Every structure is written in structure tokens, then in C-alpha cells.
Image: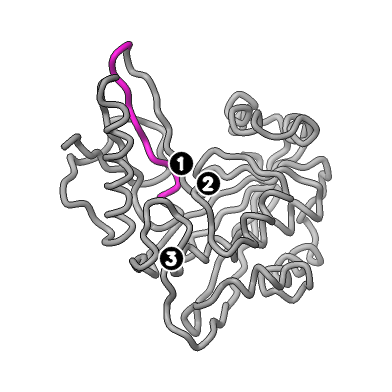
Amino acid sequence: MATRFMVMWLVAMIGSACGPTAPRGLSTLDDDEPMLTQRPALQMYLILTHQTEAMQDPRSIKEMWRAVHGERAEFRDIRTLVRWAPAEYAIDIELDFANLPHPALPMKMLQPSLRRLPSGVRQIGETAPLAVSVRSRSETLPAGEHLRLVGAAVLYMAEAFDGVIVDLMTRRAWTAEAWRTELSGRALTTAQTRLMVGQLSPNQYRLRSRGNIKFGLPDLELDASATQLSLAKTRLAVAQKQLMRTGRLTEENGQCLGNGYDGECLRVSMP
């Protein structure tokens, strides 16, 4: 990626005086089961925009942090939804920039994510001359609420510079409006993780989760025959639920065989 400049900023997010709350809204979690907290996690996004100077001045950086803190009125509801954080909790946000097209971000890589967007928004992404890269290794919070904090920074950029958002962890694209709806809901949705099914042969499939790394957890991989495919999806969901609850699996078969992961990945087997 052609870097113009890189900045890293830290912000302390002081939470309310209540304890951790139960996670809600993720299909792999029960409402009464706590998610493990304060694991190192990774979030990576692109904002594709036609404004070629986006986020390259001190004022933009300042306004981004005001959005994260909820100091801008239109971001206050998102900040309020972050119900608990340790007294000195901090998020880091690293910005990088690439002029498009660029070998590190070929359209053939971005197109599968963009194709589900409305046509007008999709065209913005497909013809954008600039990609703003957002990377954060902030620790997790209950119910994945660290995603709201970094997500508010991403939302500010998309709204301020008429951009399209690509979540590189799940390979899913968002309009700014849809991303705001996601961050403003009572609970984050299942769109924060993703199940991908690839065909290895006429009778063999490979199932992979994507997005677990945003919660400080490894992704999972499972191979199954065509007749086992439905059962394999259930098996992977059960394994992901256990991983979210405990941070480990009862049974696993070492590292994944497939490629394309941004972090650790574990293989699981059929029962």
C-alpha cells in the first residue's frame, strides 16, 4: 500500500460505574452467557472515497476523536451504548492511505464485497481514487462494544467524506447509513462475523468463519462432504459459541489448512 503518512492516536474511554453486561445479538451467544473480555483484538477497515485529501489534516483527526467520544451530537447515541469499560481503557487507531488503483488493493479483491451494495454506492467504491485504511488493535469489551468505538471513527470518515466502508475482517461492505444503523442498535448483529463456504471438489466443502479476530479469537475451519454440509454448519456454530464463551475449544485439530486468514485459525472436526 502506498503510504502518504501514518498516525496513531490513543484515547481513554471512561466507562460507567456498572459491571460488565451480558452480550446480545450474536447468533453464537446466549443472552445470559458472558463473553470473555479484554483480549487483544484486531479491526481493519477501508473507507473508499473520491475526496483525495480525506483525513489528512489535523482538523479531521480532531473531529474523528470527537465522534468517538460522543462529543458530536450525531454520535452521542453510539457512545452512550458503550455501557462499560475499564477506567483507563484506550483504543488505538492507525491510519494509512493508498492511491487507487493499487496492487495491494486490486478491484478483483474488493469487488466481491462491493457487489451487494446499492448500485450508486457501489459505483463510488468501484471508482474511488483513494482508500483510507483504518487499523485498530484495541482490547475487547463486553458484547463487542469496542467495535462501536472504532466503528464510530470509521463512520465519521465515511459520512464526512462520502465514503464506502469495507470491513476487511469479514469482507463485507457497508454504506455509511447501514453502518450507522449497525452501531446504533441495541446489540451488534451477526454481520460482525461471517460463515464462508467453499467447494473443494464436487463432493467436498470447506467452511470457514471470518471476523472472530475482531473479538480476540481465532477463526475456525471445518471440512465436510456434501451430505454433511448442513450438519457441518451447525457444528461450526456450536464451536464458535463455545469459543466465544470460554476462549478455547474442547476439541480441535491444530492449525487451518486453508489460506487467507488475517490471524490465528483452528481446524475443528465433525462429531
Precedes in sequence: disc 3 or disc 2 = 3
- Residue identifier under label 2: 191
- Residue identifier under label 1: 194
Q: Where residue 139 sits: x, y (%)?
A: 45, 66
The answer to the question of whether label 2 and label 1 lie on touching residues, with beta carbons closer than 8 A, is yes
Q: Which type of secondary structure does the marked residue at label 1 adopt?
A: strand
Q: CA distance from mark 2 to mark 1?
A: 6 Å
Q: Residue at x 42, y 57 (%)?
A: 215
**Majority secondary structure in the magenta region:** strand
Q: Which type of secondary structure does the marked residue at label 3 adopt?
A: loop
Quadrant of the rendering where the N terminus is positioned: top right
In the displayed structure, 269 sits above or below 144; it is: above
Q: Residue at x 67, y 45 (%)?
A: 165
Q: Where residue 188 sits: x, y (%)?
A: 54, 58
In the displayed structure, 207 sits above or below 75; it is: above
The answer to the question of whether label 3 and label 2 lie on touching residues, with beta carbons closer than 8 A, is no
Q: CA distance from mark 3 to mark 2?
A: 15 Å
Q: Where residue 249 sits: x, y (%)?
A: 21, 52
Residue 140: mark: none
Q: Residue at x 26, y 21 (%)?
A: 227
Q: Residue at x 50, y 88 (%)?
A: 17
- Residue identifier under label 3: 23
Q: Which residues are magenta?
A: 202-212
**10 Å crowding of disc 1: few (<14), some (14-19), many (20+):** some
Residue type of the residue flagged with mark 1: Arg
